[in-house]
Each structure stands twice: as C-alpha cells, then as structure tokens.
Image (cartoon, rainbow, N blue to C red):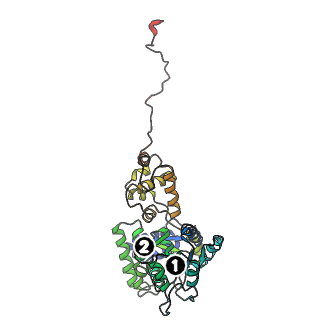
Amino acid sequence: MVADRLSDTQEGRLWLNNFLPADQPVAARLLDSLRFVSSDEFRAGMKQLMHDVAAQAAAAGPVAFYPVRPVDKELAYSEPFPDRPYGPLDGSEHITANIISEVSKTLRRSGSVMALPQIEELREHRVRTVVLIDDNIASGSTITGYLDKWWANPSIRSWRSYKLVTFVIVTYACSPLGMRTVSRHRLADDIRSVEFGGDFSSARWTPAECNEVRDLCRRYASRYAIRKSLELGYKRSESLLVIGHTLPNNLPNILWAGTPVVQPWVGFFAEGHRRLTPGQQESLAGHRAPPDLDGIAELLRHSDIRSGRYRDSYNAQRLLLVLAALDRPPRTDDWLMTVLRLKIFDLQFMLATAQRLHLIDARRRLTDEGHAALRDGKSKIREVRSKLSGTDDAYYPSSVRGVRAI
C-alpha cells in the first residue's frame, strides 16, 4: 500500500535527494500532486462514457468509433484509414482500439454502432456520428493533427457542408490547455471526458507556488535531466496525470531517469521505456492525494461548511460543496469536475440528487430550498448547557399556586 504522499515513499525519498535541501519542498509539491489512474479504472471509465455517448448519439443515426492515432508524416493519406500499419509512435492506441472492440460487441445488437469502418461503410450505413477515442488530451497536438487528416478527406468535407456528420471526442482526461486547443478545431463538435484537469493549472497551488514548480523544472532539467525541451513536458503541457498502461511524455522531464550532465540523477520513473515498473503498477495504481474538503470549501469561499452541522457526514458535505460551487458561475462540467475533484459520473449523480431534492433547477441554479440548505449546512449545532446545579438539600416550596384555596 503506497503512502498518502508520494514524497514519503522509498522511491520518492530517493528522487528528492537529487535536489538541494532548499528545493526539496518544491520538488515534493510536484511529486505529491501526481495522479495515477489504474488500467482497470481507465477501462471502466472509458467504457461507461462510450456507452453514454453512443446512447445519446443513436437517435441521429449510426455511430462509428475510432482510436486517435499520431499522424504519420511520411505517408500521404486521409482518415478514416483503419488499415494504416501501426508504427513506433503508436502506444495507447492499441488499448483504445481494444476497448472500442469490446464496446462495439456489447452494442452490436442495436445495429447502430460500428468499429473502425472504411469510408465506403460510413457512406453505405449513413453514419451520423464519428466518435474518436483518446486516453489523455494534454497539449492537444496529437488529436488536432489527427482531425486534420479527417478534414483532408473530400467526402468528410462534403458531409460536413451538409451537416450530415458530427464529431465527438471521448477521452479519459482532458487538461484546460488541451480543451482550448482542440475546441478550436473545425471538426471538434463535442469533447467528453471522465476527468478534467490533471495539469499545473488544475493543481491546488497558488500562482506563486506554481511558478516555483516551473522554475524548479527548468533549472534542474537544464543541468541534469534528459531533454531540456521536455522540461515542462511535451509542448509545455505541464501534465500531472499518469495512466497505468503508458507513461506520457507530457510529464515534467525531471521525473525521469536519464543521462546527467553533472551528477547521477535518480528518476522517479525508470529510464528507457514509458511504462511503470511492475512494483509501481502494483503500488501506485489509482493513487491520488486524499480529498481535501477543507481546501475545496476555502476555494469556494464557503469554509463554514467544514465546521457546520454536517461536519461528521462526508456525503452531506460533498453535496453542500456542490451547492457552494453552483452558487455562482461558471456552472460547466469541466469547471465543476476540476474544483470539486469529481469524475463526470460522480458529478452527474450529485447534480441529479440535488435536482431531485429540489435544491437546484434545470439550469443548475440554486433554488430557495438550495440556498436554505447551504445556509443550514454552514450553521453549527446549538449545544444547550443546563445552568441548573444539583444539591442534596431537601426542597420545600415557599409558595404554591392556589394554596389560598386550601
């Protein structure tokens, strides 16, 4: 069982020894903010989200699934190209392709879901929704390059001009940078993710703390780490998310082992391959820092929730924090998932519960009952203390109502 903080593990302590004593607290801040998603957690989340998207899109017509793949710059082609050979740049695409196969088989009875069809099959079956599957959108460069290859297909451009086909991107995680990059593409009609965030901007750091981490990554990458160009991760994506099947190159480079310029460098991750070691797969799978409800309440400016009447009820506090987050805009899924540290399925459940209890309306605004519940949750239970003191002396009433009538 891994410690609550990665900096307290044996591997974490060895990695921290790379740094000068004055820099170790900042390095520990970076390490302790990493989020690990196990392979089982990844597959379960992706399957559920793909089922949800397919069910919603089926009303418009058949749905086609494809894994997002890096662009082969040495090959002239356009998408869809399901028969394109896999190359050395392909990694997690094998995993997503396998998930697509499993989901398509379970939905085969509906007759409206297809896995990796050719362009002729898209035309023949009149597919109306193309769903592109990725594992993590950090910088957004891979998915935008892949979408460009779809736009290079004359048939796709023609269908888009007649509004006959919609593109939905499904990913386990998406960073704010990735969302901004991909959402600007002409084919990105919708982006759906299980988790949102997973980068420096989504960490529980102040702006000053974030700048300290960036400075640390730059200084030590230039002197000791493998490649200075990856000091903040590929395309400066500043990722903090690790999915069990593949270590992304979006992580800061100082986390990796490599050939140092000045002195030996011990990486938290091993050199030479983008995989967790067997020991790390067992100990780090699904690791995340314990939920900081105090920090969430403070960030939402409703710190009284943590000391209110429901301070001993975890579920009640989580629902109150959802109400606090909805007390002012924005009320979007991505912002709520980031600030509340919730997966999309947990967020949907909490929102449905709040609406069922008439605490929010259909536009996610607090009702009168919702405002009252939030106020009540921040109030403290009154502790009544009796001022009466006991005595062993006999009690004789000095006056009795109605005594004159006796």
Mark 1 lies on a secondary structure that is: loop
Question: Would you say 106 lies left or right of 122 here?
Answer: right
Labels 1 and 2: the sequence-earlier one: 2
From where the camera sits, is residue 152 visible? yes
> In the rendered view, would you say 241 is above or below 314?
below
| Viewport quadrant of the N terminus | bottom right
Q: Amino acid at mark 1?
A: Leu
Residue designated by label 1: 247
The crowd level at tag 1 (other Cα within 10 Å; few <14, some 14-19, many 20+) is: some
Q: Amino acid at mark 2?
A: Met
Q: Quadrant of residue 327?
A: bottom left
Q: Nearer the viewer, residue 120 or 320?
A: 120
Going 39% across and 57% down the picture, which residue do you hit? 300
Dot in front, 1 or 2: 2
The crowd level at tag 2 (other Cα within 10 Å; few <14, some 14-19, many 20+) is: some
Q: Total label count?
A: 2
Residue designated by label 2: 179
Q: Position of residue 268 (x, y in %)?
A: 49, 77
From where the camera sits, is residue 314 visible? no
> In the rendered view, would you say 233 is above or below 302?
below
> In the rendered view, would you say 360 is above or below 11?
above
Q: Position of residue 231 (x, y in %)?
A: 40, 81
Q: Nearer the viewer, residue 359 or 222?
A: 359
Q: Position of residue 329 (x, y in %)?
A: 37, 59
Mark 2 lies on a secondary structure that is: helix
Q: Position of residue 180 (x, y in %)?
A: 40, 73
Q: Nearer the viewer, residue 403 or 245?
A: 245
